[in-house]
Amino acid sequence: MKISTVRYYGGSRDKVCRLGLADLFLELQQIILDTEIEIAEEKQANGAAEVRKAIDCGFAAGTDWVKVASGGVDWSKRRRYNSSILVRIGVEIQVSARSDLLIRDIVHLRNSLQASEIDIGVIVVPSDQFQYFLTDRTPSMKDAIRYIETDLPEASKYPIIVMAIEHDKIGTPLKKMSTNRGKPK
């Protein structure tokens, strides 16, 4: 995948440098960059859940990334520099659900930041262009910015980084998930 845009909030850029999180942040970016996604460039032709699965596989293959099943930050990793300094990064992947669930991701990051479980939060969303090719109501970078800057402006004070991703190349459509279509007659 490609990373098309990165937006920093709440002093997150300085905190990445000051706390020695640059290595973890680069590792996170490398996982995204190493995830290959091929889509059909047609409106809503691709299943977003397949993008999520591919990204999750990248984190799972990484070293020491911890996945939370539900109710918390999707992925986190910590690094110990000596016996007393421990830094942590938390990642929310929001590519395959309704855009309004970005608010839940912001709340998960806020709660983890306040509980000192993480030092920096990252939200990964499709770019506005990539979102056009994914299923209906999939979030995009503009949605994340709107939630952080307008709908929940206190979130702009949290050390959060929003990262927009794009597909690698044009190809076959990504499989869409089957949903409950009602009972057969």
Image (tube, grey):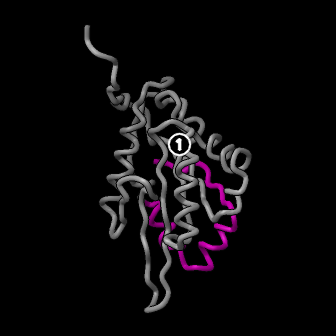
Image quadrant containing the C terminus: top left
- Residue 133 on the magenta segment: no
Residue at the bottom extreme of this rendering: 83
Neighbor class of circle 1 (other Cα within 10 Å; few <14, some 14-19, many 20+) is: some
Question: Which x, y percent locates residue 59?
Answer: 36, 58
- Residue 7 on the magenta segment: yes
Tell me which residue sits at (48%, 90%) in the image: 84
Tell me which residue sits at (58%, 48%) in the image: 4
63 in relation to 151, above or below = below
Question: Which x, y percent locates residue 19?
Answer: 58, 79
Question: Which x, y percent locates residue 162?
Answer: 59, 54
Tell me which residue sits at (53%, 70%) in the image: 115
Q: Is residue 37 found left or right of 185 in the rendered image?
A: right
Q: Is residue 152 found left or right of 110 in the rendered image?
A: right
* Nearer to me, 130 or 112: 112
Question: Which x, y percent locates residue 60?
Answer: 31, 59
Tell me which residue sits at (56%, 67%) in the image: 113
9 in relation to 39, above or below = below
Q: Is residue 79 found left or right of 179 in the rendered image?
A: right
Type of the residue with mark 1: Leu
Corner quadrant of residue 96:
top left
Residue extent of the magenta highlight: 1-30
SS for dot 1: helix
Corner quadrant of residue 123:
bottom right
Q: Which residue is mark 1?
A: 101
* Nearer to me, 13 or 103: 103
